[in-house]
Image (spheres, grey):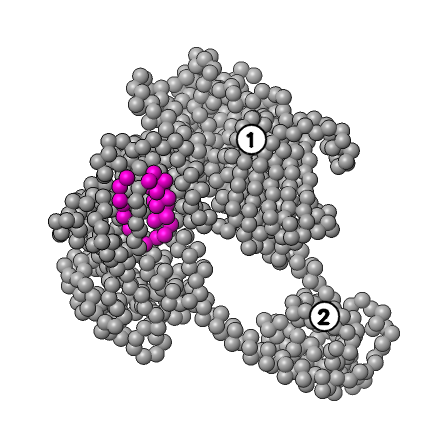
Amino acid sequence: MATIYIVDDRELNRQYLITLLGYFGHQLEEAGDGCELLALVERQVPDLIILDIVMPNMDGTEVVERLRHHPETASIPVIFYTATYRNQEARNIARTCGVRWVLSKPSEPRLILETVAKALGVESPPPVPELEAPVSSALSGDVREKWDLETRMVALTNDAMRQAYPSGETVPRGAGSEQLIQMQAMVLKLVALVELSLDAGAVREPSRLIEVFCRAAQDILTTKYAGVGILKEEGPGFRHFAMKGNGGSASSWPWSAPPGGALGLSLAERRPVCLNNLKGDLTETGLPAGHPPIDSFLAVPIVTTSRRYGWLYCADRLGRDGFGMDDERLALTIASQLSLIFENLEFSEEHQMHAGRLRQELEERKAVEEALRASEERLMLAFRGANDGLWDWNLKTGELYLSPRWKSMLGYADEEIANSYDSWKSRLHPDDLEPVTNRLSDFLGDQGSKFEVEFRLRHKKGHYVDILSRGFLVFGDDGEALRMVGTHVDVTERKKLEEQLMHAQKMEAVGQLAGGVAHDFNNILSAIIGYSELTLRKVGADEEARHYVDEILAASHRAATLTRSLLAFSRKQPVSLAVIDLNEVVGGFQSFLSRLIKEDIELKVACGTERLPVLADRGQVEQVLMNLVANARDAMPRGGSLVVTTRRMTLGRDFVESHGYGKPGQYAVLTVADDGVGMDKQTVSRIFDPFFTTKEQGEGTGLGLSMAYGIVKKHDGFINVYSETGNGTVFNIYLPVSAAADPSDRKTSDVPLRSLEGTETILVGEDDEALRRLSQNVLTHYGYRVIEAVDGQDAIEKFVEFGEGIHLVMLDAIMPKKNGKEACEAMRALRPGLKTIFMSGYAREIFPEDEAPDERSAFIQKPVSPCDLVAKVREMLDR
């Protein structure tokens, strides 16, 4: 076996390669940057080096240059291993450096082994059956989850292109290939920005924060050098400083204060400054004389609306001549994140100082209250008989009476709180203090007839109680205000219900957004799938071309599965009962569940090998599974294990008699088990009640489990739960096994094509031009005449124009001016028996769940294949 050195500053990447190559017996060493590698090479010359390009201190290009400079290391084969979003730049760099092989990360294990075999001169890699399982299981939990996340994100943007065109081939120009490559790179850079936010969220030390952001800027923008300087508020020098790409102590260089050149201009004008074609001249940059020569330079300010914190710069763009607008936007995004974090850190420090002063003030006031405590009875029997808290304030003497109920609302006994104005004022929430006291002063000054205000008072246990206070003035014979009397009502529960409603509305808005994205994506997929299937009919006996198109179709169908997941999250998946395989549904939803949980939770999915056919709506089953997994996630705040399994079970009368529900028969059982905090019996008895939640205020709607219960009941199933405090929770979902045949076994493509042909006239209303043209091409191919309409109003006008000559109308459910349903109603007002096909993947607001289509209507869910489309058209015309 070969000796291989793996060089990458990210442990995630090193551990994956070490695990993979070590599995096949290679001798492996690892290094975090180029300097560490050169030290390893001095001790032993390896057979192969797998090398990252962008690294701190010494990047991959400089490493290759030094290796090629010495005869004993010049012939060592090198593989560049770089992020997918800089793949094209990496290949340019590789050609310049004389490196033959480039791997994207993450890459499939088989591709890595094939490339390593080529670099080592081996004719073919060793056989690798069932490779992914041992490699994945050998990775540590958090590293494996991060790797899986990156792999999934690469797959979503890369599958259609990479599977259609094998590794090493050049993607043909045209057909949007350049846009696809650019989109792929930008999406993966955005993923890197998301990972940066997650990494930064766990860091509180400012000096460590700028190290993280400086490294991220160097990596995401693919530069040789990057630096971050946080300036002192007063005087020259840095509060914090970090630089990547140079091993020396850059903070000791003669930096100018305030900064000059492009650095100073960027900070003064709060905008990015880009300099290209410098040819080693640092004069315009503002960098000190000790900085290495550079050819390109980009500076962005680290600022907020009220503060200038410092600057971030990148120099020497690798693999490309200079920086562009996309680089400026990415650098600004990184700098904006860092500025917001520093601003939040300062706010936190100020809040802690204010809290300390407030605690001291409260302790002093408490001492005063105890010294002034006195008991005075005023209308004692009436006050104690009232459920609301009562207060009576003498405006002449300043004495204030607080009833026992007033004090018990805050958790105090009568003798624990002094009857004084300060007893009330000192317990006001700091945010309410000024507005409430101003409102009180205005009322006393105007001597109004009614006083009403809401505020928060601190409870004895430390939390705040929402209070509605009402009062009025009592006047003397001379018209002078003598007293102010009023009540306190505890409205905390009402406030909680309002907040739960607002949270539910917010989650609904998030779901609406997810559903809208899925709708647009379904339109794109419809065009891809449709034109791909049309292409299959044109390629004839060209097996290689058919294979390529089949791969595009397979990737498109995987993307369609993702849109179903988005629609399940948004609760907008169209309801459609069909015989489905529960094992296939759970297995296909696993990747979405992995993104739903936290990194410290281990998800295990175990589905049986036999089919579990159930009559159900796939989207609603996914909704139940998503709600149960989200509930389990929240029950494990410190991480843990989450297990999802399926199995077939026969229930007898003994089960029904012992549990008190269900009926005998064959059931498909879905189990979701966690080892979280668990619940006591009283909590278990209420978990399916609407709006009941055990989560903190604002963290849940209390609707997830009640929705799951309702969905299961609608499918003639039942659900039970077992839980103990501290020992986790197990949910079992029982769905009746269906004896009906699986309709998925019968494909539309099996229908003879000639039986789908026709000569009728069809009006197609679709606002997406690509889908409209696709429908026109497909229907025309089968002999139909097509009239096109670009929106709902246009469809109505075309229908009026062509009248009885139109035999069928196809309408997109969501269109400008008038949606599909509105357009159909207008047409049927002219011709009641008009046959209509509605098309959409997100139309539940237009077609409510309880509104079943009649004989005149049919619904097609996007994306739809051409064969399925024509089959539905023929079916409707033949009714």
Say which element carries label 1: loop
Mark 1 lies on residue: 608
Q: How far from the left and from the top, in percent, is residue 703?
A: 64, 47
Q: Which mark is residue 410?
A: 2
Q: Which residue appears at 71% of the width and 84% of the height?
A: 370
Q: Which residue appears at 23% of the width and 43% of the height?
A: 47
Name the residue nearer the viewer: 558 or 40: 40
> Is residue 323 visible to the viewer in this orientation of the structure?
no
Query: Dot 2, crowdedness within 10 Å: few (<14), some or many (≥20)?
Result: many
Q: What is the magenta range?
A: 1-25
Quadrant including the C terminus: top right
Q: Which mark is residue 871?
A: none
Name the residue nearer the viewer: 831 or 333: 333
Name the residue nearer the viewer: 325 or 206: 206
Q: Separation of disc 1 and disc 2 at Cα?
A: 56 Å
Say which element carries label 2: loop
Residue type at tag 2: Leu
